[in-house]
Image (cartoon, rainbow, N blue to C red):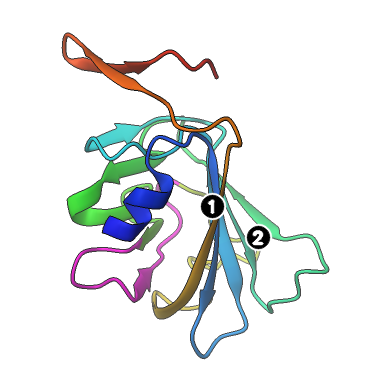
Amino acid sequence: MDSFGSCMYTLGAAIMLIRLKDSPAVFGGYNPRGWIGLGEERDSIAAFLFSWPDGDMSKRPLKVRKAGGPSLSVIDQPRDGIRFGSDSLKLLAPGKELVVYCRLGSHYEKMPSGDRSLFGEKLAELSSIRCFVSAEGPEEWNLDGIVWNTDRKG
């Protein structure tokens, strides 16, 4: 998680591209608010998950939209790892850095097939993560009373 934080925190919107060991599936998520590592729940209706279950990235990915409004889009608590929804996609949990967990249906829609996982199983072993972030550079966060704010718009 430390290496993730050093590469991702304060860099704004991000797309994660994830591969598994022993599976052709390629999947990930879009976090329009980015990670800042301050231990908060970040809300956005624009967040989504996606998957190429067969690994064929020449086709359009299957998109899984945020369900139930903007709340709990991304949970940004470094001690628990990275989460989209409370349990829709979880990874990089301390002590379980190579385990990926997915259970769709509560905060993110199910797959178009009705499947509750982006990769066909509930748990899998992580092979790689690639993250793509804004080219604007780091945000500066300041505590305003009890709320963290940045000058960056969007």
The picture places residue 30, in percent across and down from the top left corner, at 55, 46
Q: Residue at x 36, y 56 (%)?
A: 4
Q: Is residue 65 magenta?
A: no
Q: Can you give x and y, in whole percent of width and height, for residue 86 in the image?
A: 31, 49
Nearer the camera: disc 2 or disc 1: 1
* Magenta extent: 91-107
Q: Amino acid at mark 1?
A: Gly
The answer to whether 26 is drawn above or below residue 49 in the figure is: below
Q: Residue furthest bottom?
A: 22
Magenta span: chief secondary structure? loop
Would you say 6 lies left or right of 33 here? left
SS of the residue at dot 2?
A: loop
Indicate whether 92 appears above or below 5.
Answer: below
Residue 7 versus residue 39 in the image, above or below: below
Q: Which residue is mark 2?
A: 112
- What residue is pinned by disc 1? 29
- Closer-to-camera residue (104/80): 80
Quarter of the figure that contains the N terminus: bottom left
